[in-house]
Amino acid sequence: MAIKRLIFFGILLFVVGGMDAKIKTKIIAHRGFWNTEGAAQNSIAALTKADEIEVYGSELDVWLSSDGVPMINHDPLTADHHLVLEKTPSYLLKQEKLSNGEYLPTLEEYLKKGKECKNIKLIIELKPHSSKEREDSLTAKVLAMVKELKLENKVEYISFSLNAVKELVRLNNKAEVSYLGGDLSPKELKEIGCTGLDYDLNTMMKNENWFNEAKKLGIKINVWTVNKESDMKYFIEKGADFITTNDPQLGLNLVKQE
Ligand code: MG
């Protein structure tokens, strides 16, 4: 009898688990889980805190320093001394402080910490640079570093730069690559070789037909930056694959209620 019961619950778990995987929107912490004590946007602490709350992914922004080192920062300037990321050597950038007291991380430091994290995916945004050459150089360096650290299954890529997106696809046709720009249809993205679209919430609300179009084509849908509960509910209802948010805890709570 006990065995029968075990088998029954085993099957039930399998079925429910399978249904879950199909319908559940996954949550991505925008620039890590920074909206909490001790963290800052794009800090290592924000990455480990995102991992602790068990979101699907933690997003980060990458620039190439003047001497060709991939560095993590959102804005084109550092917050501390307003140094231009692209025009400053890495030894100076590494001395810049984030608001939580951490030093501005290199991509290598960030990836190494990401490797220690249990489940989290790293959603790497390649920032648009001042020239195609610099974007191409950044793209090649990031892909090589991810490969070297054996993190290819833990990393996905996003960019507003169509050049960087095409370069990612060209150099690694197995990589998960989404375009951020919002101006191309799922069909156009499929033709380029993208695996997903990662568009702002207003664009997706205006183009509701893209949900169906993307699903038919196997293009994943990620929507940013969705912070309000009502907006999160809308996109969960629409069947978005991912929501990128500054409030990952709220996103997780809503997804768990589904
Ligand atoms: Mg970003």
Image: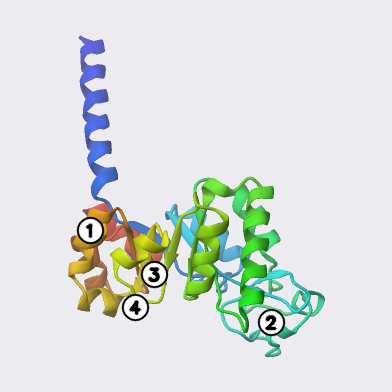
Q: Find numbered disc 4 in the image and state the secondary structure of the residue it sits on.
A: loop
Q: Which residue type carries mark 3?
A: Thr
Q: Check the image and report above or below for 216 versus 178.
A: above
Q: Position of residue 178 (x, y in %)?
A: 42, 64
Asked whether the residues under the numbered discs 1 and 2 touch, taking CB atoms below 8 Å apart as contact, a structural biologist would say no
Residue sitting nearer the eye, 158 or 255: 158
Q: CA distance from mark 4 to mark 3?
A: 21 Å
Residue sitting nearer the eye, 151 or 78: 151
Residue found at x 40% / y 76%: 181
Q: How many circles with numbers are drawn on the protein? A: 4
Please indicate whether residue 99 sits to the left or right of residue 230 in the image: right
**Quadrant hosting residue 21:** top left
List the single residue furthest toward the right: 91
Please indicate whether residue 104 sits to the left or right of residue 59 in the image: right
Residue found at x 52% / y 72%: 163
Q: Find numbered disc 2 in the image and state the secondary structure of the residue it sits on.
A: helix
Task: Say which of marks 4 and 3 sits in front.
Answer: 4
Q: CA distance from mark 1 to mark 3?
A: 16 Å
Q: Find numbered disc 1 in the image and state the secondary structure of the residue it sits on.
A: loop
Q: Position of residue 79 (x, y in %)?
A: 63, 85
For residue 3, say whether it is visible.
yes
Location of mark 4 (residue): 183
In the rendered structure, find residue 239 and report the number of the disc placed on it. 1
Location of mark 2 (residue): 86
Disc 4 packing (10 Å; few <14; some 14–19; many ≥20): few
Q: Check the image and report above or below for 207 versus 20.
A: below
